[in-house]
Image (cartoon, rainbow, N blue to C red):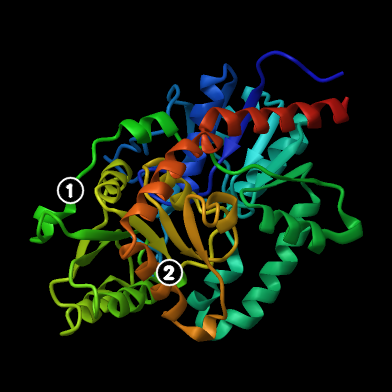
Amino acid sequence: MTPSGPLRIAIFAESYLPYLSGVTVSTEALARGLGAAGHEVLLVAPRPAAGVEPGSAGAVGPEPRTAWLPSFQVPGPAPAGYRVPWPRPSAALREAAAFRPQIVHAQSPFTSGLMARRLARRAGAPLVFTHHTRFGDYRHYLGPLSAPGASLLDAYLQRFWRGCAAIVAPGSELATEISERLSRQRRAVVRTIPTGIEVAALAALPEIDPRPMAGWSADALVVTTLGRLAPEKSVDLVLEAFADVAADEAGVQLQIVGGGPSEGALRARAAQPDLVGRVHFTGQQPHAAALAMAKGADLLTSASRTETQGLVLAEALALGLPVVAIDGPGVTDSVRDGIDGLVVRGNPAEGAGPLAAALRSLVRDPARRSALAAEAVAGSDRFDAPVRIASMVALYRELLARQR
């Protein structure tokens, strides 16, 4: 029989607010969304730096009860504010044990994931793990250790997966990949449950017009991109595709929302004669402000091939922005090609050409942009947070029924 009634769920986070990333936004959305659905939640997360409040990324729901783990700032190349837990006993772990969770949900396979696994075994609770990150796509940060490091990480992940009752993948391609790699040894349920977004809140969000800030004319057509400026996000490819379009489209401009280690190189490229005055950098922004700045544009583009679900793409569609994105993991889970955006397929060796061609086609066709924007808004209910939370709770109940 499937258990009914409110559940007690302990969520373990490796990183958390105020540091903004897809993972921290997803973690807050899960914790607050479960609380809004009537469940009892304990969030176990690394404590922010002294004197810093975690704040909110805008998720709807009650502020979760939080047990703060002792934490430290990760050294470079990790960004400022990225704190992770110390692997040691703490009052937070004692509080988590006293909570007696029915479900333990890890957001990382590393320090906090091991803490979550230990608590799940102690409490006799199913361990759920959300695989937010395609870790292999970040191995370039390991330098000469990237090849052996990737091999060791892959072996570690497979061992961690096998200790879980369920693995949640935010995108269908990642779910398939995990299932195939677990092969016949799989005991865990593998389920695709994307992170939900607050569709109504995004629709009501006041837009910030980038044109006066950048010194552009009021009738400029603005393309935007949104996210961390890092090598794995391929913002350099967006810049080159835009340069191609800008060469013969005088009224189009590019807004780059976000910050990160690639910002200096991107600014230097944008200062070259073919782009000077055509690109505006907003720098790192709070989540709501970043989305408001994106909403003031006419369309959004992305060249990242390292996503798990394309959360930014879903947010853009809910904002009413047509999307032009290079095909990659999670992209088609969000973008309906030819309906609310364009999915650019092709060989990476072709460079920026295919992306530029897709962007140019929408820049030159305002009627099609309007049609895509209307479909983006009309279809955004599929991303709504309560829908995703209901899917997660159904998985929890399924696991508890199996356990019984």
Asked if residue 103 is positioned above or below residue 211 in the image, the reply reads above
- The percent position of residue 347, horizontal first and vertical second, equals 57, 80
Q: Nearer the viewer, residue 147 or 226?
A: 226
Disc 1 to disc 2, C-alpha distance: 24 Å
Q: Residue at x 68, y 24 (%)?
A: 100
Q: Residue at x 72, y 63 (%)?
A: 156
On the rendered structure, is 243 left or right of 33? left
- The percent position of residue 295, horizontal first and vertical second, equals 29, 46
- The percent position of residue 17, horizontal first and vertical second, equals 39, 43
Asked if residue 258 is positioned above or below residue 246 in the image, the reply reads above
Q: Nearer the viewer, residue 256 or 117?
A: 256
- The percent position of residue 21, horizontal first and vertical second, equals 42, 52
Query: Image quarter for residue 279?
Result: bottom left
Residue of label 2: 358
Q: Quadrant of the N terminus?
A: top right
Asked if residue 288 is positioned above or below residue 333 in the image, the reply reads above
Q: Amino acid at mark 1?
A: Asp
On the rendered structure, is 300 left or right of 251? right
Q: Quadrant of the C terminus?
A: top right
On the rendered structure, is 2 left or right of 314? right
Callout 2: SS: helix
Please say whether residue 337 is visible from this viewpoint.
yes
Please say whether residue 81 is visible from this viewpoint.
no
Furthest-right residue in this view? 184
Q: Amino acid at mark 2?
A: Ala
Q: Which mark is residue 209?
A: 1
Number of the front mark, 1 or 2? 2
